[in-house]
Image (tube, grey):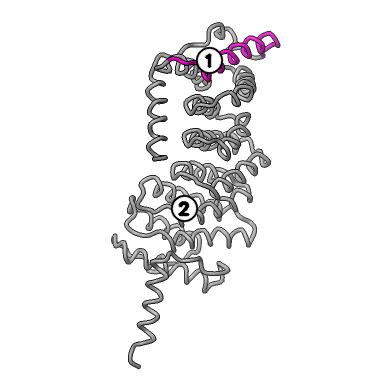
């Protein structure tokens, strides 16, 4: 039911987004300015305050007013190429202030989703604190989706600016989200976000989130499998960047959990091959991974990787195994014990 509700709200927003956006009246002269005076800021603030208020209070039965107000803001947030850096900076600051003031009055799912959709589309550091709070506390799945998506979209600019404190806070927020009821699409977005950071705290959070996620989401899910493919690439990058011996061991433990818990059939059959190829590249060794597609033998080869990493003391312990694998191991041990000598 949660997925149905999320899809319904997202479809409503997409359909609404196809309507003609209400353009910001009176903003034309501000967009190209290299510096905005206090009067310019005041004009922008007034427009944003009124438009955000319309977005959360409009009572049209078809939500036309809400949609028009939201699309007017989104049109400005997405029009980066036609705006000066100064305009974009002031726009981001004033939009965040307007959303902060309006957020407590936004009680419906549609109004809250519209608010966080607008903040997400900024792709700006200014919106990150609001998005992190929404990711943790918002009551609506669709709002939390836009919070996760917004954090992922902002991560590129944040990583480029090298802001370690903000990266650390975002990494901690992602790790906390994986402790709760997280949807597969949110997990995909947050894992993608973590993969964009080179901070040690982000590497640690990435490993922790991968370990939690792989024990919950099957690789047969088409979104989950894309999350795993991205996670393999991110873990490989993290391993190459790590200078801490314990950090490298931790990343390899993330790989070991993927080897243990990923079960065929995968929605994307390239997943297990990508996992094996990354481990070969990292270690410079091989375990006899099959050269032709064979899900069962691919899984057995991944289990060999676990034993190899543990035997070579590259991971401190074997990962916990899925119940089905544990049962198979017990049966095999029992058969070997009972076999005639």
Quarter holding the N terminus? top left
Label at residue 54: 1
Label 2 secondary element: helix
Residue 96 part of the magenta segment: no
Q: Name the chief secondary structure element in magenta.
A: helix
Above or below, comparing residue 42 to residue 298 in the picture: above
Mark 1 and mark 2 in contact (Cβ < 8 Å)? no
Q: What residue range appears in magenta?
A: 36-60
Return the x and y of residue 72 as percentages of the image width and height. 49, 16
- Name the residue located 50 percent from the left edge and 64 percent from the top edge: 283
Q: Which mark is nearer the camera, 2 or 1?
A: 1
Label 1 secondary element: helix
Residue extending farthest bottom? 341
Quarter holding the C terminus? bottom left
Quarter of the view holding residue 129: top right
Do we see residue 89 in this rendering? no
| Mark 2 lies on residue | 232
Return the x and y of residue 38 as percentages of the image width and height. 70, 11
- Name the residue located 33 percent from the left edge and 50 percent from the top edge: 267
Within-10-Å neighbours for mark 1: few <14, some 14–19, many 20+: some
Do we see residue 330 in this rendering? yes
- Name the residue located 68 percent from the left edge and 41 percent from the top edge: 165
Task: Pick whichever, 222 or 65, lies toward us.
Answer: 65
Within-10-Å neighbours for mark 2: few <14, some 14–19, many 20+: many
Above or below, comparing residue 305 to residue 75 in the picture: below
Q: Mark 2 or 1 closer to N-term? A: 1
Above or below, comparing residue 64 to residue 177 in the picture: above
């Amino acid at each position: 039911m949660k997925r149905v509700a999320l899809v319904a709200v997202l479809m409503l927003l997409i359909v609404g987004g196809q309507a003609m956006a209400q353009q910001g009246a009176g903003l034309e002269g501000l967009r190209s300015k290299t510096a905005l005076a206090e009067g310019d800021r005041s004009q922008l603030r007034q427009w944003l305050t009124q438009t955000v208020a319309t977005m959360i209070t409009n009572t049209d039965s078809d939500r036309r007013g809400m949609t028009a107000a939201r699309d007017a803001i989104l049109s400005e947030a997405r029009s980066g190429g036609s705006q000066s850096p100064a305009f974009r900076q002031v726009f981001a600051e004033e939009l965040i202030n307007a959303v902060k003031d309006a957020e407590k009055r936004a009680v419906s799912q549609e109004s809250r989703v519209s608010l966080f959709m607008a903040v997400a589309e900024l792709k700006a550091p200014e919106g990150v604190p609001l998005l992190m709070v929404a990711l943790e506390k918002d009551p609506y799945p669709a709002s939390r989706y836009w919070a996760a998506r917004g954090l992922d979209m902002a991560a590129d600019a944040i990583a480029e600016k090298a802001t370690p404190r903000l990266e650390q806070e975002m990494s901690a927020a992602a790790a906390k989200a994986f402790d709760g009821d997280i949807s597969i699409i949110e997990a995909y977005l947050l894992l993608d976000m973590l993969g964009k950071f080179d901070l040690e705290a982000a590497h640690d959070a990435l490993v922790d989130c991968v370990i939690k996620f792989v024990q919950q989401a099957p690789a047969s899910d088409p979104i989950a499998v894309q999350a795993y493919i991205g996670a393999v690439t991110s873990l490989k990058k993290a391993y190459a960047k790590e200078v801490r011996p314990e950090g490298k061991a931790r990343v390899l433990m993330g790989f070991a959990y993927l080897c243990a818990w990923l079960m065929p059939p995968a929605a994307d059959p390239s997943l297990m091959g990508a996992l094996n190829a990354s481990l070969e590249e990292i270690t410079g060794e091989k375990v006899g991974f099959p050269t032709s597609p064979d899900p069962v033998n691919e899984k057995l080869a991944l289990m060999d990787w676990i034993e190899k990493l543990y035997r070579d003391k590259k991971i401190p312990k074997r990962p916990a195994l899925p119940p089905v694998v544990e049962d198979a191991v017990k049966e095999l041990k029992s058969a070997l014990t009972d076999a005639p000598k």
